[in-house]
Image (cartoon, grey):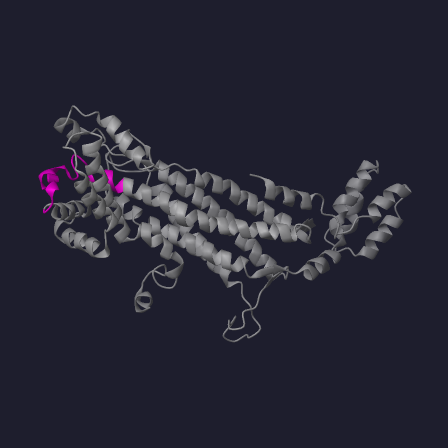
Amino acid sequence: MSDELLAISPLDGRYAHAIDALRDYFSEFAFIRDRARLEVAYFTALSQDAHLIRELTPTELDILQSLNDSFSLDEAQQCKEIEQVTRHDVKAIESFLRARLAPTSLSDLLEFLHFGLTSEDVNNLAQSLELRESRDKVILPALDGIIEQLGGFIREYKSMPMLARTHGQPAVPTTFGKEMSVFYIRLRKQRAVLSTFGFEGKLNGAVGNFNALVSAAPQVDWLAFSEGFIHSLGLQSNLVTTQIIPYDNWIRFFYTLHLINSILLDLVQDIWHYISNGYLKLKLVATEVGSSTMPQKVNPIDFENAEGNLGLANALFAHYASKLPISRLQRDLSDSTVRRTFGTALGHTLVAWVSLARGLGRIEADEFAMRTDLEAHWEVVTEGAQTILRSAGVHEAYDRLKAMVRGKQLTQEMFNKWVEDLPCDKSVKEKLRALSPLTYIGLAERIAERALTEE
């Protein structure tokens, strides 16, 4: 607790618990650990795939596997201490691994640690793996929870009529479930893009040409080796790079997250308005306080928290899109600083999603408030009325209604009197009398049901 109180970033302070699941992918410890594991995997592949070094014994493979499995905070700290001397993080990891393997039977192969690589070969692969694994184990489950909650609203409220608004003004009726189905489908579509996204990686040396590897071991097919090694990690290989992989691949991933967050911003602002106008109620928690001075208040704080964190996350995603595609010549180091904030952007995203999910779990629709509002606005059925009149061949039906209702609020009595005074057939009047704000919802219910069945 004292550490959280001293944190500068709210992600490591106030919201520390919400982002705990991301620490295994984007903490400094995770980045050191994952790069050490890649160094070990590459070293092993030089034996098993490139056949550049001698065959490793089962005992030696166990030693290497143990390095991966048991990598600890203490060992990461040792790497950091070495880095204080080297001022180079990847070289510090190599030095750490050398020290660990020196007392073993692998001591004759130490020169093949980080053999022919540039640090970026290790860094880009580690970060691609971290992005992929955090997506699968943290990001997608959190998003699925929100989508499932929206699905519950659709099922429960698909038939509940609600006054819709365009330009903030009373429009025509819809149902609350249908409105939630729009967000449900939008999120489902982007979820599909996110879940199938393929991350790229590169392993090709200091300027992307395998210079050192070819000069030292020209007998090895380094193009095939690089592709095979990257594919073995579950990544897509990019062989045409400079020292750094073009970041276009990551940016497309972040664009998808940016779009998802923008959809959720739309949702939280709509929910906020529905709460404000009384269509939605917040469930009470007896111990909570809504204001230091106004005891009556129950505030939509979860939705407001989500809105703020979605904006912060998207600001970082937008910066990635403008900064990372550009690098001076073969590379400059400004990208490294930016890339270390990936966890921050995903952290604010996760905090927002957790807050939103909590808020969605505390709202319920107020059917009485929705019905009352609809019954006070009979002018919203004039869209249907003028369309019925048009179909019956009534001249200038739209203009007749416009003169009566534009900028005015219509009651049921006023509407019925207008229908009674119309010079048209009885059958047309019966259609008009059948209109009601409570039933003029078109195919909203069917559309909501269909949304639940779409893949």
Whether residue 58 is visible here, answered yes or no, is yes
Residue 72: quarter of image: bottom left
Q: Residue at x 77, y 55 (%)?
A: 410
In front: 152, or 374?
A: 152
User: With respect to residue 219, does 129 lie above or below?
Assistant: below
Q: Tell me the residue at 72%/53% (across/down).
A: 407
Whether 98 is among the magenta residues is no
Say which quadrant the C terminus sits in.
top right
Depth check: give the residue in front, 113 or 10: 113
Residue 207, can we see it? no
Nearest the viewer among 133 and 355 is 133
Picture coordinates of residue 340 (x, y %)?
Answer: 29, 49
Determine which quarter of the picture holds residue 362.
bottom right
Q: Residue furthest front?
A: 58
**Relative to the observer, which residue lies in front, 145 or 165?**
145
Asked if the magenta segment contains residue 120, the reply would be yes
Q: Which residues are magenta?
A: 103-124
Q: Does 252 sit above or below residue 173? A: above
Predominant SS of the magenta segment: helix
Please identify the residue farthest to the top as the structure is shown. Answer: 219
Q: Position of residue 111 (x, y in %)?
A: 11, 38
Asked if 189 appears above or below 279 in the picture, the reply is: above
Image-based side of 407 in relation to 416, left or right: left
Whole-percent x and y of residue 304? 49, 59
Left or right: residue 125 versus residue 296 is left
Number of disc labels? 0
Where 410 falls versus 49 (above or below)? Answer: below
Q: Quadrant of the N terminus?
A: bottom left
Q: Position of residue 306 (x, y in %)?
A: 47, 57
Q: Please report the residue visible at 31 percent of the width from the left and 33 percent of the height from the top.
A: 231
